[in-house]
Amino acid sequence: MHKLESHLCFGGTQEVWAHAASSTSCEMRFSVFLPPQSQNARCPVLYFLSGLTCTEQNFINKSGAQRYAAEHGLIIVGPDTSPRGAGVPDAEGDDIGLSAGFYVDATQAPWSAQYRMHSYVTQELPALIEAAFPATDVRGITGHSMGGHGALICALRNPGRYCSVSALAPICSASRGWGRKAFPAYFGENPDTWRQWDACDLLRASEDRLHLLVDQGDADPFLKDKLQPDLLREACIEGGHTLDLRMRPGYDHGFYFVASFVGDHIAHHAAALKSV
Amino acid sequence: MHKLESHLCFGGTQEVWAHAASSTSCEMRFSVFLPPQSQNARCPVLYFLSGLTCTEQNFINKSGAQRYAAEHGLIIVGPDTSPRGAGVPDAEGDDIGLSAGFYVDATQAPWSAQYRMHSYVTQELPALIEAAFPATDVRGITGHSMGGHGALICALRNPGRYCSVSALAPICSASRGWGRKAFPAYFGENPDTWRQWDACDLLRASEDRLHLLVDQGDADPFLKDKLQPDLLREACIEGGHTLDLRMRPGYDHGFYFVASFVGDHIAHHAAALKSV
């Protein structure tokens, strides 16, 4: 594991690290913001999962999250969005392959060898963070777009592993929305396999009852065809989950939207994580 | 003039525009953040000048300034850092030519025809902003690195035009620091011509008394050779200006530093601009 970047920011430190990851059989990068409070005590960790086309950089450059994490004493960890490097499979288009890992463990060749972001994000990375940084094992998870889908499925497939879940403009039902191209490639043609990685299907089947905070811009150009918050609303009602879905008039899908509301999400997670 | 981007952000609107600029004889882009207060009343304007290698995008993507501008009801305008386009002269290196306009009016060929960022930033752009947007003619100016130099010389060469001035990690004496390559190219070999565009020389000669707010990271790798805040301190003492120079332990030169302190600068300008 080696440090690539370290910058003071709002009294804490924004770092970027690289390490040889076994889940994905490649070098992975991740960002970690260490708030000032972590100099004196272990802090809970909020995982932020990014969207299509992003790396570990976009969120730390553009969201302004460090200010809120420093206020609340949360560590924020941001993994990359797919395996990368020589030999890692890719395909045409932004919504499959590199930068489009969808936080799943693929089962179909050629993807299955390295597109194992679910294992990486839920197991390998937290184990590393909790061993190498002043972090507790109290975890929250959130994300944007594909990363919102990721946050939901990580929480739903791993009951008890995250104390809080939220999402910004999530892909609510990847198999019916923005994952329609990636899911058949990663899992094959049988739709039953897709349901195991689709947040809406998982919400219907879950025995856990989640309390979800979701923000969504109503001027988001991907709203109806690719994000589908109406499906999330229905699935939460059917599954008995609490959903605080806040439609934000006039906001689009980009980082100006994320920056505007990430402070609310960090406050939401801080309240949950610090009460454990 | 045409709009290239418009995004809701913290209840206001982050826009990017392009227009045919007469000062620089090319199309220029600028960013403008319109706070929510500007829907009902004209607001004062803070000009933010960016550093070497930047365009009008870096500050609006990375600083998080919109949150503070929305709180205080300030419009923030961010011009590009040089003329651009087919036929605009350039030279080897990051510190001359494209993205390195230094907010001066060059006098030497081939630069003198279009490298007229001083006229653009202090005259043409404010006239356009005050005609086309809900802006008053109450102006503040700030900037980062080369843009900090720009803010200082714009205020010093145009007494009464700006009600408040500040800078983040400014090039304090361009002719002795980070402008050592650009200044002879833009103004010729006679150092007397450089002094007319050097903040420290202008501070010594100014009849106005400025109250300057400056933040500077003490782990900034450009501190001693290229930024030289010690020269600024001396020039302010000699010229009788008030300087609040805050050395920030451990901070470097990048946007994590800018993001950490831009809120203080916006509050400083808001207090001055709203008391006019």
Image (cartoon, coloured by chain):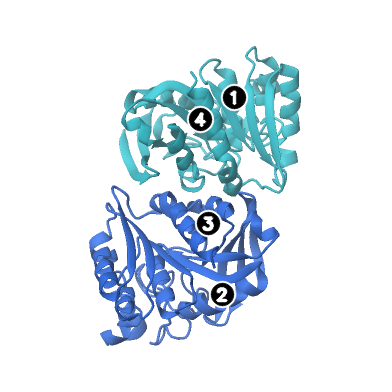
Chain colours: A cyan, B blue
In the rendered view, tell whether residue A203 sits above or below residue B87: above
Q: CA distance from mark 1 to mark 2?
A: 49 Å
Q: Which element carries disc 2, helix, strand or loop? A: helix
Q: Which residue is mark 2?
A: B125
Dot 1: within a 10 Å radius of its alpha carbon, few (fewer than 14), some, or many (20 or more) residues? many
Q: Residue at x 53, y 23 (%)?
A: A272
Residue B30 showing in the rendered view? yes
Marked residue nearer the N-terminal end (4 or 1):
4
Residue A194 position in % (x across, y down): 66, 24
> Is the C-beta separation of discs 2 and 4 under 8 Å?
no
- Quadrant of the image for the N terminus of chain B? bottom right
Residue A128 position in % (x across, y down): 37, 25
Q: Which residue is mark 1?
A: A153
Q: Which residue is mark 4?
A: A115
Q: CA distance from mark 3 to mark 2?
A: 18 Å
Q: CA distance from mark 2 to mark 4?
A: 50 Å
> Is the C-beta separation of discs 3 and 4 under 8 Å?
no
Q: CA distance from mark 1 to mark 3?
A: 32 Å
Discs 3 and 2 share one subunit: yes
Q: Which residue is mark 3?
A: B60
Amino acid marked by disc 1: Ile
Is A132 situated left or right of A215 in this image? left
Dot 4: within a 10 Å radius of its alpha carbon, few (fewer than 14), some, or many (20 or more) residues? many
Q: What chain letter is assigned to the residue under label 3?
A: B
Q: Residue at x 35, y 45 (%)?
A: A8
In the rendered view, tell whether residue B253 sits above or below residue B205: above
Discs 2 and 4 share one subunit: no
Amino acid marked by disc 2: Leu
